[in-house]
């Protein structure tokens, strides 16, 4: 390596472009290479770079998702048959979901293109389910008490 590359005014950008220029001149001047060969080699190089970075992007997205509380779903795990009690618990249970916390809202919108719209939608959805749970709870309480004064007995 020459002293030029060890100096304090060394520019890696300039260094890289100079080498690219030299390699390109070398490839063009080679009698055995066609323009198509050079083109295909450049495209292949860019494709490999894209795949390399996609791999690590996917890995980092999954890791960030885990850090924010999202867990992966293993679809290969065996699923047991639901019992009649499971069915009743799922469809007839009075459920009062808790309000979403700030971190959960942010995690839900991390992959959305328009995060503000995603967040607004999630807030509305959470509000709907909270109101629905309150109504269901009140309905169950009224039903346990025998209904309203005007409710016909069954």
Image: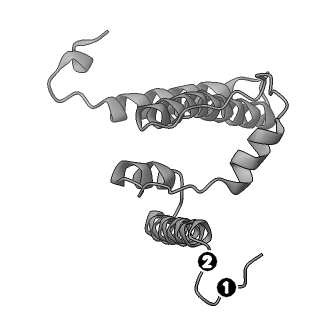
Q: Relative to 46, does residue 88 appear above or below in the rendering?
A: below
Where does residue 27 sit, x and y in percent of width and height? 66, 26
**Closest to the observer, 79 or 67:** 79
> Which mark is drawn over residue 106?
none
As measured in the structure, the alpha-carbon distance from the residue carrying label 1 to the one carrying label 2 is 6 Å
**Closest to the observer, 46 or 1:** 46
Q: Relative to 115, does residue 39 appear above or below in the rendering?
A: above
Figure quadrant of the N terminus = top left
Contact flag, marks 1 and 2 (Cβ < 8 Å):
yes
Figure quadrant of the C terminus = bottom right
Q: Residue at x 61, y 73 (%)?
A: 146
Where does residue 72 sit, x and y in percent of width and height? 60, 31
Position of 116 with respect to 132 (left or right) is: left
How crowded pointer 1 is (Cα within 10 Å; few <14, some 14-19, many 20+) is rated as few
> Which mark is drawn over residue 147?
2
Q: Residue at x 23, y 19 (%)?
A: 4
**Closest to the observer, 3 or 59:** 59
Where does residue 32 sit, x and y in percent of width and height? 79, 21
> Which mark is drawn over residue 151?
1
């Amino acid at each position: 390596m020459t002293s030029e590359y060890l100096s304090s005014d060394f520019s890696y950008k300039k260094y890289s472009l100079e080498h690219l220029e030299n390699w390109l001149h070398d490839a063009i001047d080679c009698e055995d290479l066609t323009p198509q060969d050079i083109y295909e080699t450049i495209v292949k190089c860019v494709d490999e770079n894209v795949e390399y970075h996609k791999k690590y992007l996917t890995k980092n997205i999954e890791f960030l998702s885990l850090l924010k509380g999202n867990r992966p779903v293993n679809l290969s795990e065996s699923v047991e048959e639901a019992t009649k009690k499971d069915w009743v618990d799922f469809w007839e249970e009075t459920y009062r979901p808790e309000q979403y916390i700030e971190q959960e809202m942010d995690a839900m919108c991390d992959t959305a293109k328009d995060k503000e719209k995603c967040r607004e939608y999630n807030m509305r959805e959470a509000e709907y389910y909270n109101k629905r749970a309150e109504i269901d709870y009140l309905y169950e309480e009224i039903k346990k008490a025998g209904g309203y004064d005007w409710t016909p007995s069954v």
